[in-house]
Amino acid sequence: MSFDAAGPISHLDAPSVIRTKRDGGTLSDEAIDWVIDAYTRGEVAEAQMSALLMAIFLRGMTGHEIARWTAAMIASGERLDFSDLRRDGKPLALVDKHSTGGVGDKITIPLVPVVMACGGAVPQAAGRGLGHTGGTLDKLESIPGFTAEITKSQIRQQLCDLGAAIFAAGELAPADRKIYALRDVTATTESLPLIASSVMSKKIAEGTKALVLDSKVGSGAFLDSEAESRELARTMVELGVEHGVQTRALLTDMQTPLGRTVGNAVEVVESLEVLAGGGPDDVVELTLALAREMCDVAGLDGVDPAQTLRDGTAMDRFRDLVAAQGGDVGSLDAAMLPLGQHTETISAPRSGTMGDIDAMAVGLAVWRLGAGRSVPGEQVQFGAGMRIHRKPGEAVAAGEPLFTLYTETPHRLAAAASELDGAWSVGDHAPPTRPLIIDRISM
Ligand code: URA
């Protein structure tokens, strides 16, 4: 590429780049750097990037292409650096977590304060909902006043004083921000190269020193098979290590939703139950497993994450964090978070045992209730969501509620309920159990 006074002059053009990938070719480093930069600056049209994303979705990328695409997305913005920050004269134990996307996956909300209470410092660049999966920012913004639009100096201050900041990626990897929003509405989310580069560009740019990934396996995950989720985890671990971030991953089950709530405010309510020392077993188990990995990779010795839930210190840290980011802590006390006023209950047709509940169907139902987006930038409904009254393997009495659906727009209820048709059953026997934590992947 050469430059004149008006900016870069390139011999590359979007149709040729799209054509190369459409026809199964490999994109050159130059083509990748150019298309990411030009798209971020608005010189490649949304329609052209949509076509390229679909070509990548269908044709895939080589390991080298993924690494280059990730590096180009990091280079599209700034890379934060907190290595100068000190607490009690010592460098901060900077560590973060990211999930590849799941249904009912509210784990970041209890996990961040647990790690704060263990002495870690979490610079968490969080995302919005993608496809059928929810986003941490959409959930947290259901707390009145809470904002993730915080300045760099506030992030630094919070990391030193409190041990965490949860922020919108903003100028970090702005190429990902645009591509993420486009993937959400062009059916191009479920792609290994696009997930790996999206997650890792944000996480490398956010300035963490260590990272634990939660790569989901099962119907509610973006990738179909365990082999693909494993490959995704390996790819992301390699990308992190190449960029100097100590990275490891857990492979975890996402065949059935996590916990008993799916949506925005309802998931915050359940997270508060976990922070109060209760909550569903699977949410507690995964929170603690990820917290132990984070403390270990950050070198925090002799800490007990479970104790922080028992003694209330994690709850105290969460309240500090919410208050620092403008949230109304009073609304947490009174469980005043907004649940949709229009509801529908699905009841048990017979007595027996709850069978498997399909995570993808639940994710789509909650999306239809208004918890996610169908056009870029759409405002989600904080009150949209679902309560799952009986988890797989639990006893069911005929006529009792199994699912309660919440929305602010009643015309959505019928379509959401029909997503659940055939996605659950009540039978005579408990379904086979699966481990929640399937494997651990490191280099
Ligand atoms: N999380 C992300 O940040 N990006 C994805 O593509 C999927 C999950």
Image (tube, rainbow, N blue to C red):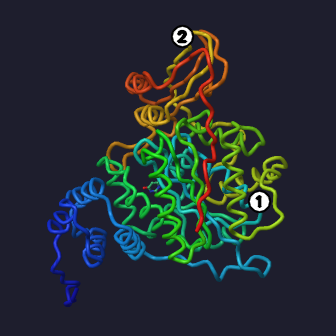
Q: Position of residue 244 (x, y in %)?
A: 55, 77
Q: Position of residue 175 (x, y in %)?
A: 36, 67
Relative to 105, say whether 69 is above or below: below
Q: Residue at x 64, y 39 (%)?
A: 269
Horizontal side, residue 184 vs residue 301: left or right: left
Q: Amino acid at mark 1?
A: Ala
Q: Residues within 10 Å of mark 2 (few under 14, many from 20)?
A: some
Looking at the image, can residue 331 be seen? no
Looking at the image, can residue 228 be seen? yes
Relative to 354, say whether 132 is above or below: below
**Nearest to the observer: residue 343 or residue 216:** 216
Q: Kindly indicate whether the residue at mark 1 contacts the one at mark 2 (C-beta within 8 angstroms).
A: no
Question: Looking at the rendered structure, which numbered label has been put on residue 349?
Answer: 2
* Upstream in sequence: badge 2 or badge 1: 1
Circle 2 SS class: loop
Horizontal side, residue 434 vs residue 135: left or right: right
Relative to 96, say whether 307 is above or below: above
Q: Please state the quadrant of the image where ligand 1 appears.
A: bottom left
Question: Looking at the rendered structure, which numbered label has been put on residue 117?
Answer: 1
Question: Looking at the rendered structure, which numbered label has been put on residue 345?
Answer: none
